[in-house]
Image (tube, helix red, strand yellow):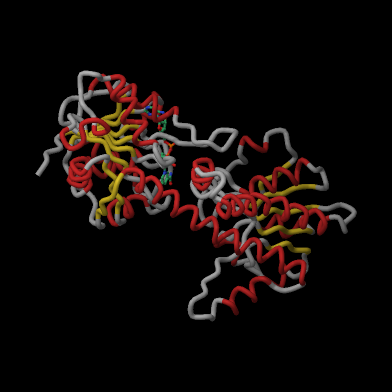
């Protein structure tokens, strides 16, 4: 069994920090590396800078025990796990600059026998690029792209598929796809994950592992696009889409998702583009799904505007601006975009009910938008737009809501 006495986690965000904390909680020394000094200071004081249930408790415990420390300077370790951002650029191609700079930072401290794992969601070929950047910086060491199983440094891609809100549980319980650049890389990576993962570790190569993660999110995106397209068709044909989906789903082999105002978050709305940009001619359906889902917020916006237009003084209450139900995450949120465009159109007064935040996001700066309670909205607004199916909204009296003009993009009423 390979020994991992010291593990370095590079990038201490939503993925890296829980990963570092869980590994440290198994008694392994973990050194977290991040470019963000304030995050490093927060972690070293035993606190957390991101919202994730129970993460604060685990981090405090492992920092107090001396098992986890954070730093801005690379230090030697037996394994390096890279969890830096991989956004897309204006042309929808993946921005690998964070991975490249992480490679340059850890390269000087690499030693023969080390394992480097890329956890960031990446386009096919990114792990090979990472290995090339490392090799360029360390010509004195051998890497799997040239030395295969005999390489001094092993490199693998092991994508992360945890669900925010359940990260600590899913980090341990989910199955993992382990894509080594050689058999030796996969074997070594498995022995690291076995230290904290109870799920199955499934071996493949790096390219398939990269594609697996992108495929999972594209599968979701395409299925959501199908539901969203159906909702638009149903509006045109005067059919209730919610009833339709329920009926169709009584077929034993049909399982249609519910339509919504679009697709949000930084995974499903982003990752399919990595496939499209790698195979633009071939990825027709995946691109179309992205376009259908990206068009949906504009469609809902127009519905709200038309509904509000019948009032002399429209007062529009947007219910929810998070990217999905019962979270405070506003990243890439279609509900937020719809609300912003509504306020920019100056069609009337815009109120926001978002039980998961205390103040409006910076994106609304300079716009006339008020954050209010459900009760205040029910008193003041004549037009309602359900943009997120938060549990609080499901408790609104449907009889009261029936007195309002309603655009219900989540079908909760
Ligand atoms: N958040 C999720 O739910 C989730 C789920 C699955 C996969 N992923 C993927 O995991 C990766 C990380 O996502 P995240 O949500 O944790 O991002 P994040 O923005 O929360 O965290 C990234 C961290 O990396 C740090 N960083 C940036 N450049 C660095 C560098 N050169 N060296 C060291 N640190 C650096 C940042 O300061 C930040 O703290 C992405 O590829 C993402 O697509 C995220």
Closer to us: 391 or 400? 391
Q: Which residue is drawn at 54% across and 54% down?
A: 324
Place residue 106 in its image quadrant: top left
* Nearer-the-camera pick, 205 or 380: 205
From the top left corner, tell me how far across and down residue 287 is, in percent: 58, 49
Residue 289, percent across and down? 59, 54
Q: Does residue 338 appear left or right of residue 308 in this picture?
A: left
Q: Is residue 194 left or right of residue 304?
A: left
Q: Where is residue 121 shown, x and y percent of the image?
A: 41, 42
Determine if residue 25 is in view. Answer: no
Foreground: 124 or 50? 124
Q: Please indicate, yes or no, whether residue 42 appears anywhere in the rendered image.
A: yes
Q: Residue 341 appears at what percent x and percent y?
A: 73, 44
Q: Which residue is drawn at 36% across and 44% down?
A: 207
| Ligand 1's quadrant | top left
Tell me: 256 left or right of 71.
Answer: right
Which image quadrant is residue 140 in?
A: top left
User: Which residue is at the front of the view, 307 or 52?
Assistant: 307
Q: In this view, does 110 lie above or below 404?
A: above
The residue located at (57%, 44%) in the rendering is: 332
Q: Residue at x 80, y 43 (%)?
A: 345
């Amino acid at each position: 069994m390979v020994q991992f006495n010291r593990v370095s986690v590079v990038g201490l965000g939503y993925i890296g920090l829980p990963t570092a904390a869980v590994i440290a909680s198994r008694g392994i020394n973990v050194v977290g590396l991040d470019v963000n000094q304030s995050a490093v200071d927060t972690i070293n004081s035993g606190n957390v800078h991101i919202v994730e249930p129970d993460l604060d408790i685990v981090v405090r415990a492992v920092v107090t025990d001396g098992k986890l420390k954070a730093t801005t300077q690379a230090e030697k370790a037996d394994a390096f796990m890279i969890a830096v951002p991989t956004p897309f650029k204006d042309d929808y191609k993946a921005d690998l600059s964070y991975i490249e700079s992480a490679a340059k930072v850890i390269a000087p401290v690499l030693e023969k026998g080390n394992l480097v794992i890329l956890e960031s969601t990446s386009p096919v070929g990114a792990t090979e690029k990472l290995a090339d950047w490392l090799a360029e910086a360390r010509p004195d060491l051998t890497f799997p792209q040239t030395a295969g199983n005999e390489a001094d440094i092993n490199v693998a891609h092991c994508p992360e598929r945890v669900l925010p809100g359940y990260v600590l549980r899913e980090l341990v319980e989910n199955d993992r796809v382990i894509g080594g650049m050689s058999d030796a890389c996969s074997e070594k990576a498995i022995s690291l994950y076995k230290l904290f993962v109870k799920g199955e570790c499934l071996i493949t190569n790096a390219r398939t592992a990269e594609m697996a993660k992108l495929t999972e999110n594209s599968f979701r995106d395409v299925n959501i696009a199908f539901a969203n397209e159906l909702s638009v068709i149903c509006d045109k044909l005067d059919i209730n889409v919610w009833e339709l989906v329920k009926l169709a789903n009584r077929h034993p082999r049909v399982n249609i998702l519910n339509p919504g105002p679009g697709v949000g978050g930084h995974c499903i709305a982003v990752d399919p583009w990595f496939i499209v940009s790698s195979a633009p001619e071939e990825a027709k359906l995946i691109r179309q799904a992205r376009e259908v889902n990206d068009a949906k917020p504009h469609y809902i916006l127009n519905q709200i505007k038309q509904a509000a237009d019948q009032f002399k003084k429209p007062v529009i209450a947007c219910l929810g601006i998070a990217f999905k139900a019962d979270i405070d995450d506003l990243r890439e949120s279609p509900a937020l975009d719809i609300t912003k465009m509504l306020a920019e159109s100056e069609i009337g007064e815009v109120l926001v009910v978002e039980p998961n935040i205390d103040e409006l996001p910076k994106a609304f700066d300079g716009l006339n938008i008020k954050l209010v309670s459900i009760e205040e909205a029910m008193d003041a607004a004549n037009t309602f737009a359900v943009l997120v199916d938060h549990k609080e909204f499901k408790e609104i009296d449907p009889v009261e809501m029936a007195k309002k003009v309603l655009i219900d993009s989540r079908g909760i009423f």
